[in-house]
Amino acid sequence: MLALLKKDVLAFFSSWMGWGIIASFFVLMGVYVWVVDGNVLDFGFAELSVFFNLSPWFFLFLVPSLTMNSFSEEVEKGTFQLLRSLPISDTQILGAKCLALLSILILVLLPSLFFVQSIALLGLPASNFDSSLIYGGYAALLLLLLCFVGLGVLGSSFTKKQPVAFLLGLVLNFFFWQGLKELGWDMFDLSSPYNRLSMGVLQFTDLCFFCGFVLVLWGAIRIRMSRII
């Protein structure tokens, strides 16, 4: 399992694509956090609401691009059955893939810690910033990324074609991020609990919602894995 996890993570950073994504994320977020109207300096508060409001939209597109080859590529090339022949269970295969994807996304997020350090230095007095909003924002973003990864991997399990897997992942992510809210089903969408957590409002029901959502996705993916020939 660890070997599979390591292989997936190293594959991402074996080309310039991985480093390019990290650099693009850092530059794009930096522009919105510090330059564009409505940035941190305009608000005058030592917090990163701008960052946490925009980040989900970036990952909405990034995650499907990472998950699209989770199963589709291996099924198309016939390597999934070879993977299954190894002395590891389907649960371990799925766990390794999801953990590798989450590890990559955490590495993409790491440069954003410079934003935290920057507002800490700008605070009066120094290091005086709204820690509840920042810690809550990162916790909410990680939980949301778990959901996006699950939805993307589920989409990849339905097709052998990577472009189709990307579109399925993108549609699923958008549907559960904003689509349900537009339909008036706020109690089932991901944006409502994310917004509350990112504002530092910790509710047990929101944590249960995210955990339940991930468990349902895990079960759905396991069912799809059992039907892949």
Image (cartoon, grey):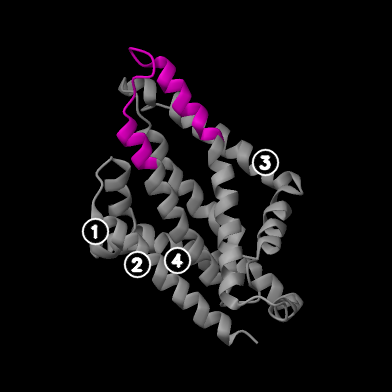
Question: Which corner quadrant of the image does residue 206 belong to?
Answer: bottom left
Labels 4 and 2: the sequence-earlier one:
4
> Label 3 to label 4, Cα distance in Å?
25 Å
Q: Nearer the viewer, residue 148 or 95?
A: 95
Residue marked by disc 1: 205
Looking at the rendered structure, the kind of residue marked 4 is: Leu
Q: Which circle's residue, 1 or 3, is located before the other in the chain?
A: 3
In the picture, measured across the screen, residue 95 lies left or right of residue 52, that is right
In this view, 215 is above or below 158: above
Pair 4/2: label in front: 2
- Majority secondary structure of magenta residues: helix
Query: Is there CB contact under 8 Å for labels 1 and 3?
Result: no
Which portion, as a residue range, is magenta?
111-137
Q: CA distance from mark 3 to mark 2?
A: 34 Å
Label 1 Cα neighbours within 10 Å, binned few <14 / some 14-19 / many ≥20: few
Question: Any mark on residue 172, and which?
Answer: 4
**Lower position in the chain sequence, tag 3 or tag 2:** 3
Residue behind mark 3: 20
Residue under label 2? 212
Q: Secondary structure at mark 2?
A: helix
Q: Amino acid at mark 2?
A: Gly
Q: Position of residue 68 (x, y in %)?
A: 61, 65
